[in-house]
Amino acid sequence: MLSAAMTDLLNDQLNREFFSSNLYLQMSSWAEAEGLDGCATFLRNHADEEMGHMKRFYNYINEKGAMAIIGAIDAPQTKFKDIKDVFEQIYEHEQHITQKIHEIVKAAFSEGDMTTFNFLQYFVAEQHEEETLVRSILDRVKIIGLDGKGVFFIDQELARYGSGEVTVAESMAPGAE
Ligand code: OFO
């Protein structure tokens, strides 16, 4: 059984995951309009992943006999300067999400709600993975730059990550093409 306070915290996070999905889908649409197909695919896949996170919270809350509540979701912004701006905003957003997940983990622990504490461990690991991924992409953007063919190469890299052909870590390993 979830406490009323924990139900609220989990529902708030469910709605943040929904917002994350919409944000990445909107970013994908921006990228597609800019002709950045690799970036668009990568972001669309990421939007699907966030929707998967939303459903994990939805299912968990309902399995525990409480009710998942879909609230009003803020509209994401529609204008971005360039790919660097997009990934800087993603990085900032993911750091915010990590902080929120950690707050819920702490609340679950102090309530002695070990089932929820355990449920949240997936998200602790996932946030670490996402922050690492986005930081790697930003490092790559800094190395390659956005001048000349830079945007083209970065878009191609993102297409490879988006298709699952290669992970960012693999492509950055010494000796990788
Ligand atoms: Fe749901 O992992 Fe990002 O926000």
Image: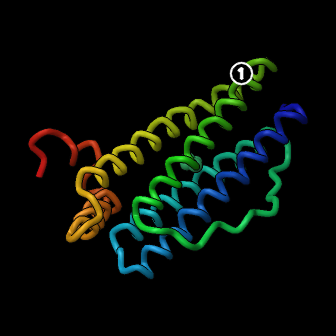
Amino acid identity at mark 1: Met
Task: Say which of 85 and 112 sits in front.
Answer: 85
Q: In the image shown, does 130 or 111 lie closer to the viewer?
A: 130
Return the residue nearer the eye: 107 or 136: 136
The residue at the point 50 percent across, 76 percent down is 29
> Measured from the top left, where is residue 129 in percent x and y?
44, 39
Q: Secondary structure at mark 1?
A: helix
Question: Residue 5 occupies which quadrant of the picture?
Answer: top right
Q: Kindly identify the residue that appears in the image at 35 percent across and 75 percent down.
A: 37
Q: Residue at x 56, y 32 (%)?
A: 124
At label 1, counting other C-alpha atoms closer than 10 Å, the crowd grade (few under 14, some 14-19, many 20 or more) is: few
Q: Position of residue 48 (x, y in %)?
A: 52, 61
Q: Spot the residue most to the front.
A: 147
The residue at which mark 1 appears reads as 114
Q: Position of residue 144 (x, y in %)?
A: 23, 56
Residue ID at (74%, 64%): 74
Q: Position of residue 153 (x, y in %)?
A: 22, 65
Farthest right residue?
Answer: 4
